[in-house]
Amino acid sequence: EVQLVESGGGLVQPGGSLRLSCAASGFTVSSNHMNWVRQAPGEGLEWVSVIYSGGSTYYSDSVKGRFTISRDNSENTFFLQMHSLRAEDTATYYCVRMPAASHGWYFDLWGRGTLVTVSS
Amino acid sequence: EIVLTQSPDFQSVTPKEKVTITCRASQSIGSNLHWYQQKPDQSPRLLIKYASQSFSGVPSRFSGSGSGTDFTLTINSLEAEDAATYYCHQVNTLPWTFGQGTKVEIK
């Protein structure tokens, strides 16, 4: 089955760190552009970061310098390392695929999300 | 950053009625605009790609149009299962951005 499964969310204090993982099955992570999109409670969608199939990475201004996206090709998994977390980072984090293999610059596959809560 | 503004923010609609949601971009984005549906407690789902192309498995009552700065999502003959929040999304320029969402309620 083609799917994405996030893990690693939880409660963390302001200033703390957390690492999110997204395990893919049914397709190859490194052949696609993989993203993180977040949604604060009761709010809309916000794009966070992308790692292109070629390895280039990009971030939203709100997380640049604090978050790092990476992938492990052998595990078919990608990650979001989050440092210096703030209350405004509280959100459900979705991992999302852009199907680079078909030149698709759209989000065609979403995980179920993992909740990150930043609070003391 | 390209700002996407959707209207309306909320719409209460009777089943079988037609729904129209608009999305306006702060600068021209060609056809690099997609639409998603998010039902309560679910992940978003792609409906329309590149402004007017239906994604696989999406019911034919959903359609999209527009280019440049003005885009429209139309739901013909609304069904109860269409109660959701709808988002537009541009991929013309990083950072990719979303509209604020339009919540569609069934009367």
Image: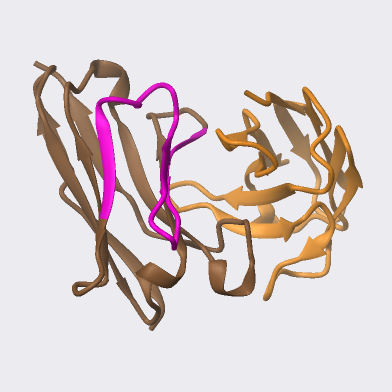
Chain colours: A brown, B orange
Q: Residue at x 75, y 58 (%)?
A: B79
> Which residue sits at x=56%, y=56%?
A107
Residue B44: percent from left, percent from top: 52, 52
Viewer-side residue, B81 vs A38? A38
Check the image and report above or below for A70 versus A92. Answer: below
Residue A35, how many percent across, how many down?
A: 42, 50
- Picture coordinates of residue A96, whole percent (x, y): 44, 56
What is the quadrant of the N terminus of chain B in the image?
Answer: top right
Residue B30 versus residue A115: which sits nearer the camera? B30
Q: Nearer the viewer, residue A59 or A54?
A: A54
Q: Residue A46 vs residue A63: left or right?
A: right
Span highlighted in magenta in the image: A45-70
Mark count: 0
Q: Residue at x 15, y 19 (%)?
A: A119
- Say which quadrant the C terminus of chain B sits in: top right
Where residue A76 sits, quadrant-wise, is bottom left
Above or below for B32 versus A44: below
- Does residue A90 show up magenta in the picture? no
* Along the line of sight, the residue nearer the viewer: A103 or A16: A103
Residue A91 higher or lower than A100, as above or below: above
Q: Is residue B105 left or right of residue B74?
A: left
Residue A39 lies, with reference to residue B81, above or below; the image says: above
Q: Position of residue A22 (x, y in %)?
A: 27, 59
Magenta stretch contains residue A61:
yes
Q: Which residue corresponds to the image point at 75% horizontal and 70% vertical from the top-left?
A: B59
